[in-house]
Image: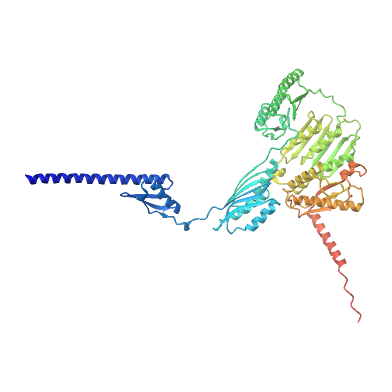
Amino acid sequence: MRLSSILIRVATFGAAALVAYVGSSTSVSLLEKRSGMAVQEALIDANMAWSRVIADGLQIVIEGEAPTEVARLRAVTVAGGVVDASRVINNASVKDTSRAVAPDFAIEMLRNESGVSLIGLIPADTDRESLTDDLQDMAEGDPVTDLLETADYPVPSSWRASMHFGVRAMDILPRSKISVSAGLVQITASSDSPEQRAQLERRIRAMKPEGVAMQLNITAPRPVVSPFITRFILDTNGARFEACTADTAEAQDIILQAAANAGFEGRSGCTLGLGSPSRQWGNVVSQSIEAIASLGGGTLTVSDADVTIEALIDTPQDTFDEVVGRLENRLPEVFALSATLPEPEVESETGPPQFIAALTDDDGVTLTGRLPNDLTTTLVENFAQARFPGSEVEMGTLTDENLPTDWQVRILAGLEALSRLKEGSLTVEPDSIVVSGTTGNEEASADISGLLVNKLGPDADFSINVEYLPELDLVVAGPSPEQCVSQINIVTANRKITFDPGSATLTAEAGATMNDIAEILSQCIDLSIEIAGYTDSQGREEMNLALSQERAEAVLSALRARRVPTSSFNAIGYGEADPIADNGTEEGREANRRIEFRLVTEDEAAEDGEATAEEDADATAEETPAEPEAAAE
């Protein structure tokens, strides 16, 4: 009985011990699992997904391949924030850095008025000295900041072509940021005008090498338009613009919508520019076009703050008064309205006097018709030669003392308008001017309208029928040598290249003219030009010849300073030869003091080369002493 009691007690203690062991094992396993999961989550939250956590009893073992030694040690720190750091065993390895790939080479080049700066990573075998020399020449004395770093890795196949292209692009973009990587060049730059932007884009696209991608973004400020003009006509030929200018895109939309409502079906937009007299420009032009439509037709000219309307001859007087009165009351105070209802014309047996000019690409300019007594044939011929350089001017005019008082102004303004065309004609009558022809300038109609309004007034009656031909566009097709020289002569006809009195020093005012000439020449390739200098007849002939030579060379030097390639240019002074005006008057002497640009043809260059060779041979023969005669035997 006693033995049985002892066995029962032993069995009871054994069962209790077994239950305690099982409970303890379960608790340890649960604690081990929870600790491992907590540490793994903490490592993942710390961007260490490379790690693996193994819970071994109370110990936490970290395994895996860390990218760096710092990352391997930091894993222990993260784990120690979850469990006691003494329980953490770090068995992680470090990634083998000997297998690292080459870095991505890239360079960013900045150029502005402060100089040139470079930052980035380039291959170690880059010709650093050549790159620096190119940038120093480009900076023209401004500082070059080099913050480049190098790495000794193989050069990507397209790196050199991309780098060379980027440097060439920056050479023609004085305000630019150019980012270069292997196979890609990103260009961000600014230009002085939309025309210059188009020219730069054309040049850069032409020089882009194959196999190199390009992202090009060149911005341009809006041009200053003076006068700020819109001219709209509605007659039996339909609705059309001879000029359209707007200060904002919203104003352009308002103007074109009003024109469409009046019957305009064209697709051309308005020139967006600066110089509007009021923020209400778009509304004023729109309301004025609506007035023309309400009148049943007419001509509208809005030039700066002057609104001029000329109704059709058969417009009823009451309709004219109502429409004009309503418009006048709607215009802002800054604008002034002038409206005219023409009276029916009385036909003359002989017809109105006329002056006619015809411009052709081959035959030059032919002038016929009537001239006033105070405008001589010689003056008109000289004016035409200045406006149409390189063209034959054929005169067939007669003088007439019974012409309108403004006949001279109308003729000269009309010729200047015709000079903006490639081919065309001009007809001047007492009450109208008609300009028609072809051009390579999309803005020619607007330019001519602005010119005639500026010369003749906003109420002038003129008609422009100009056709734009893309093949004549200097921006799209690139200028021919003849076009380049013609453009230069147009610039110098309007603004002469001037010098300090009696010297070859260019005046400050001549700087802007030289900048324009350099811009034209930057678009011309393989151009042979003679820069000819002339003086008036005052002073000694030898001194005038020397002064004209010095002035021609000064212009050549000024072009070189503006980075114009001048290896095929030649500066020649002709002194007082070939006057274009009377040296007996101050005005004539002023005209004779001039610089002219002439295109040298291949035949002329060959003749000059032969002549120079003959002169050199003659000079050599004169300088070489004759061989002594043989002595008598």
Looking at the rendering, in which quadrant would you find the C terminus? bottom right
Measured from the top left, where is residue 551 in percent x and y?
Answer: 83, 50
The residue at the far front in this view is 2
Tell me the residue at 79%/28% (across/down). Answer: 459
Is residue 372 among the parts visible in the rendering?
yes
Is residue 312 among the parts visible in the rendering?
no
Closer to the camera in the image, 493 or 120: 120
Tell me the residue at 38%/54% (across/down). Answer: 91
> Is residue 462 left or right of 403 when viewed as pictured?
left
Closer to the camera in the image, 109 or 274: 109
Looking at the rendering, in which quadrant would you find the N terminus? top left
Measured from the top left, where is residue 150 in percent x and y?
Answer: 57, 56
The residue at the far left in this view is 1
The answer to which image quadrant residue 452 occupies is top right
Closer to the camera in the image, 13 or 130: 13
Closer to the camera in the image, 16 or 192: 16
